Image (tube, rainbow, N blue to C red):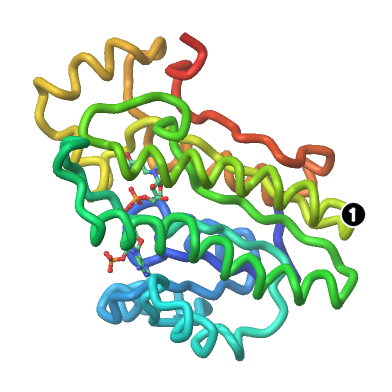
Amino acid sequence: MDVSFAGKRALVTGAGKGIGRDMALALARCGAKVTAVTRTQADLNSLVQECASISPVCVDLADWGATEVALQDVGPIDLLVNNAACASLQPFLEVTPDQFDQSFNVNVKAVLHVSQIVARGMKARGSGGSIVNVSSQASQRALRDHTVYCATKGALDMLTKVMALELGPHQIRVNSVNPTVVMTDMGRLGWSDPEKAKPMLFRIPLGRFAEVEDVVNTILFLLSDKSNMINGVTLPVDGGFLAC
Ligand code: NDP
């Protein structure tokens, strides 16, 4: 996408693999100074090898205290992508408290926490900013074996809207993208079995899953000033799945 983030500072969570990794690289290519946050050091090492200007931060975002410490020195941030999430699939009747807590800690609580840290700085500087939360089509449609994941993404959509309401007066825009299946590690977990993938593909009018690039380009748009009047939306990147 033809946007420049020269002079902007960006933070991407879950930047070690999948969508988050390509997101961090795309922002760096567009001129942003990028801080990449994830919990596996080896992923950060290879990311910095690929793009030396990226600043790595290794932390488990499920740990509130460790996150507070890890992010205390990242400095001012103009653009935030809350991308990190986990998915553990099981039938509704088999969901355990641990699976529930782990998923809500990463997919919802950490988004709130990282956004608080970043938005406090944006507000204090009066510089505004843009935050994109990576949600899912699963926030708005029931998917078999996805009880906890669907619930976290439903909560994330509502969190996005309240953040947009409260941060808007400080010129901080908050939106989400809601992709369909993307064949990353997480996507393969749920959809690599052709028997499961086929009915899902059938429900997507464009007849294909999303590519990482489809999601990254949409986030670049929402972060950029080309979307200056867009605030509080949950934007499907789903080939029409949620329209039907
Ligand atoms: P991946 O599993 O490929 O990558 C997730 C990244 O987040 C990894 O680098 C992972 O690190 C990191 N991460 C996970 N938990 C933590 C944690 N506790 N602390 C720090 N980092 C963490 O996922 P995707 O790229 O597929 O997903 C990215 C986003 O897109 C997620 O929000 C997901 O819900 C959403 N999404 C994905 C879809 C898909 O089909 N793939 C569809 C719709 C939405 P590590 O590997 O070390 O755990």
Local packing at callout 1 (Cα closer than 10 Å; few below 14, some 14-19, many 20+) is: few
In the rendered view, tell whether residue 60 sits above or below residue 152: below
Pick the front one: 121 or 145: 145
Q: Position of residue 146 (x, y in %)?
A: 27, 37
Look at the image and tell me in which quarter the N terminus lies: top right
Residue linked to disc 1 = 169
SS assignment at label 1 = helix
Q: Position of residue 89 (x, y in %)?
A: 20, 43
Q: What is the quadrant of residue 14 in the picture? A: bottom left
Ligand 1, what quadrant? bottom left
In the rendered view, tell whether residue 123 sits above or below residue 56: above
Q: Position of residue 183 (x, y in %)?
A: 26, 39
Pick the front one: 106 or 220: 106
Q: Position of residue 33 (x, y in %)?
A: 62, 74
Q: Residue at x 51, y 44 (%)?
A: 155
In the rendered view, tell whether residue 79 sits above or below residue 87: below
Q: Residue at x 32, y 44 (%)?
A: 148
Left or right for 230, reference 176: right
Q: What is the quadrant of residue 71 in the picture? A: bottom right
Left or right for 221, reference 231: left
Left or right for 217, reference 186: right
